[in-house]
Image: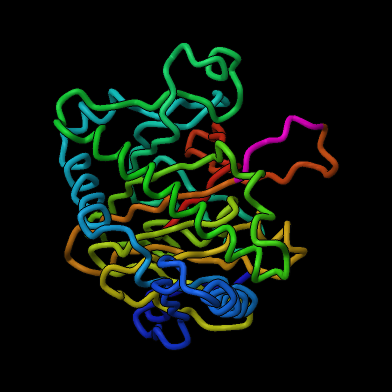
Amino acid sequence: MSAAITLDMLHSASSVDFPVIDLGGYMQGEAGALAGVAEQLRYALENIGFLIVVNHGIAPELTDGVVEQARRFHAQPMSEKLKLAAARGTGSGFTGYLPSGEYSVKTSEVNDNDQPDLNEAFFMDRERAPDDPEVLAGRLFREPNKWPDNLPGFRDFLLGYWEAMERFSQKLLPIFATALDLPSEYFDRAFVDAQCVLRLSHFPPTRYRDNQFGLAPHTDANFFTVLPQANVEGLYIRPQGRDWIKAPRVPGSFVINAGDMCRRWTNDRFLSTQHLAINLTDRHRYSTPFFYTRISTGRSPAYRPVAARIIRRSTRRLPMASTGCGG
């Protein structure tokens, strides 16, 4: 387990050695671009576990707009947000609102997270009607989304943004495959109707206790995470054997990291790096990670289950194994 994390450590963290990859040529279909970006991604995920991509093709109206939608949602009265409270216990899915201070990320390898996390969040998944056959069957992570009644345009914007992020994530799969010396289409079939969770997090200005964070140190459980630049810095990562590194704010970029599923699928070749989020400023911070995870094949498992759980202060479990927590 890592040594105790202090605010001084985070205040002194630098942003050196944070890989930045230009996707422009690849997104435009230039010859040879796939091999070039795959080589860069391979280096980043074998050595850091995180990278930043620029010229990714997602319009600023979407990346800026999703931060604004996060602000709008969390500006609502608590009574309105609690109408959309996420299911507690072992329900079939996890959508809706999760208040601040109600949970902590429990791990045994990263940090002794004994304080509640100080962020509130809204979760959405693939849009499904209540009579969707998979919803009616109670299939895990197939819960309909919960939408506010009094935020005009919120649902429509997020559905459009979610679809754009799924398409972008699909375009990343050939890069991951090529980086692993596999056929470029290797991962495509596994991610048809993929599990994609969008989280809108709010980190208010806060005075933190010892060993308390906006989002405690953790690794993501999913395949990879795509994080647009938050409006305020606050993401810190710790590659193996390294000090804490602060993610730099590169306007218009995405931060991408591999999760535990990717690490396991690649036999530990690609790293799933511990990270945390904390707001050390006097401004409200909004973060909007998009978690991308493969579907279940329906076959009998060949390996024992790997648990990834969030524990509410009441000790009830939430079904978060298919996603991460983000930053």
Q: Which x, y percent locates residue 277?
A: 39, 62
Q: Is residue 295 magenta?
A: yes
Q: Give the left or right position of residue 301, taking residue 272 as reference.
A: right
> Residue 176 versus residue 119: which sits nearer the camera?
176
Question: In which quadrant will I find the N terminus?
Answer: bottom right
Q: Magenta segment, principal secondary structure?
A: loop
> What is the quadrant of residue 158 in the picture?
top left
- Looking at the image, which residue is at 65% across and 55% down? 185
Write down the region rendered in magenta: 294-299
Q: Which x, y percent locates residue 234?
A: 33, 68
Q: How many marks?
A: 0
157 versus 143 height, above or below: below
218 versus 71 height, above or below: below
- Looking at the image, which residue is at 42% across and 18% down? 129
* Extreme-front residue of the structure: 31
> Residue 71 versus residue 278: which sits nearer the camera?
71
Q: Give the left or right position of residue 22, taking residue 81 as reference.
A: right
- Looking at the image, which residue is at 50% across and 16% down? 132
Q: Is residue 163 magenta?
A: no
- Looking at the image, which residue is at 57% across and 19% down? 134
Q: Which x, y percent locates residue 9?
A: 42, 80
Q: Which x, y percent locates residue 30?
A: 46, 73
Q: Give the left or right position of residue 177, taking residue 194 as reference.
A: right
> What is the quadrant of residue 2 in the picture?
bottom right
> Residue 253 versus residue 96: which sits nearer the camera?
253
Question: In which quadrant will I find the C terminus?
Answer: bottom left
- The way the protein has been coloured in the rendering is rainbow
214 versus 181 height, above or below: above
